[in-house]
Image: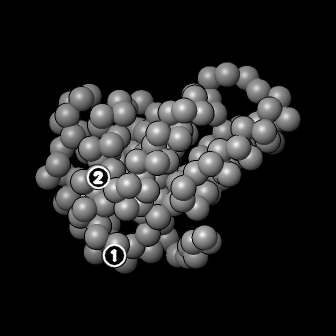
Amino acid sequence: MVLQLKGIIPPMITPLKSYDELDRQGVERLIEHIIGGGVHGLFLLGTNGEGPSLSYKIKKEFLKLSCEIIKGRVPVLVGITDSSFAGAMEMADYSKIVGADSVVVAPPFYFPTTEAEMINYLEHLAAATPLPFVLQYANAHQD
């Protein structure tokens, strides 16, 4: 399946009351505000959305609530970058269950990898994800 993406798909922050409590009303207000502004999709749990620093419990609660609020009005892209293949797949599978449209992955962090290892990882992850796959690339080297 190929997902046709277009227009503006902003990365959304994750409204929290504390490090382990989602601000459910804040999530709804923010989603309605962003969609009301005319965006063409939402990108959840990227680095702007604190994705790598949240517990799986909070990530899943946030994804489920967000998809319930969005109700298919715009595509939902979910950052699944993790330091483990199993963790990335857990989030990819859950994203499909709750109604997301695509997963987004950046190269794994923390462990140094060779180019061949990175290609192998991404090929396996792309083949295993149950949703369309978007590769997020950020060049760490600036000239």
- Residue 64 image label: 2
Dot 2 lies on which element? helix
Asked if residue 46 can be seen in this view, the reply is no
| Direction from residue 134 to residue 36 in the image, left or right | left
Q: Quadrant of residue 110?
A: top right
* Number of marks present in the image shown: 2
Query: Which corner quadrant holds the N terminus?
Result: bottom right
Asked if residue 126 can be seen in this view, the reply is yes
Query: Which corner quadrant holds the C terminus?
Result: top right
Percent from the top left, x then y, of residue 78?
A: 46, 52
Residue designated by label 1: 73
The disc, 2 or 1, on the residue closer to the chain's N-terminal end is: 2
Front-most of residues 123 and 75: 123
Q: Amino acid at mark 2?
A: Lys
Front-most of residues 29 and 57: 57
Q: Quadrant of residue 75?
A: bottom left
